[in-house]
Amino acid sequence: MNSRILLVLLAALSAASCAPQTPQSRIGKDPARFAALRESEKPLVTQGRIDRGFSRDAVRIAWGEPGEVYAGSKDGKSLERWDYIGARPVQVTHFGGGWHRGWGPYGCPHDAFDFGPEIAYVPYRYATVWFTDGRVDSWERAR
């Protein structure tokens, strides 16, 4: 009986870890951060939208953590660029160059020819936010 409960709990935990993040889930994890936002930011943030002049925290709640962050300077102002990275599945066909030693059914070694279709995941940038002195200056999203 205990092993069944443990198995169900592990399955639920695994499913929950794969759940997509939403602004509402990020607000639920850190309500104090959301409460500290300006009143003008809150309605758009809950919809997953951002606007010029928004703080970094507002963008984090609306869009989540960026995949990459770049810092710089222009005309004496600090600049920052946040890139949001995704992965697209792409089917590729390869011919592995001949026979190789591998592991077959039941853990037995065997020889096999390595070829055929596979799915590879190619990273791409789907959104970018530019900050000037800690506030959103502009942004773009892929359609």
Image (cartoon, grey):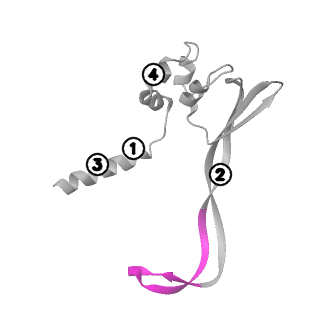
Left/right of residue 27 with respect to residue 99 in the rendered view: left
Residue beneath label 3, please? 9
User: Residue drawn 44% across and 42% down?
Assistant: 19
Mark 4 or mark 2: which comes first in sequence?
4
Q: Quadrant of residue 122?
A: bottom right
In whole angstroms, how far apart are the C-alphas of marks 1 and 2? 24 Å
Residue beneath label 1, please? 16
Q: Quadrant of residue 69?
A: top right
In whole angstroms, how far apart are the C-alphas of marks 3 and 2? 32 Å
**In the figure, 105 relative to 143: above or below?**
below
In whole angstroms, how far apart are the C-alphas of marks 4 and 2? 33 Å
Residue beneath label 2, please? 123
Q: Amino acid at mark 3?
A: Leu
Q: Amino acid at mark 2?
A: Pro
Mark 1 or mark 4: which comes first in sequence?
1
Image quarter where the N terminus lies is bottom left
Q: Residue furthest top?
A: 39
Q: Are marks 3 and 2 in contact (CB under 8 Å)?
A: no
Q: Position of residue 96 (x, y in %)?
A: 64, 78
Q: Position of residue 81 (x, y in %)?
A: 70, 34
Give whichever of 72, 113 is nearer the camera.
Answer: 72
Mark 3 or mark 4: which comes first in sequence?
3
Can residue 36 be seen at all in this image of the molecule?
Answer: yes
In whole angstroms, how far apart are the C-alphas of marks 3 and 1? 10 Å
In whole angstroms, how far apart are the C-alphas of marks 1 and 4? 23 Å
Mark 3 or mark 1: which comes first in sequence?
3
Q: Which residues are magenta?
A: 100-119
Q: Quick one: label 3, few (<14), some, or many (20+) residues within 10 Å?
A: few
Mark 1 or mark 2: which comes first in sequence?
1
Residue beneath label 4, please? 32
Image quarter where the C terminus lies is top right
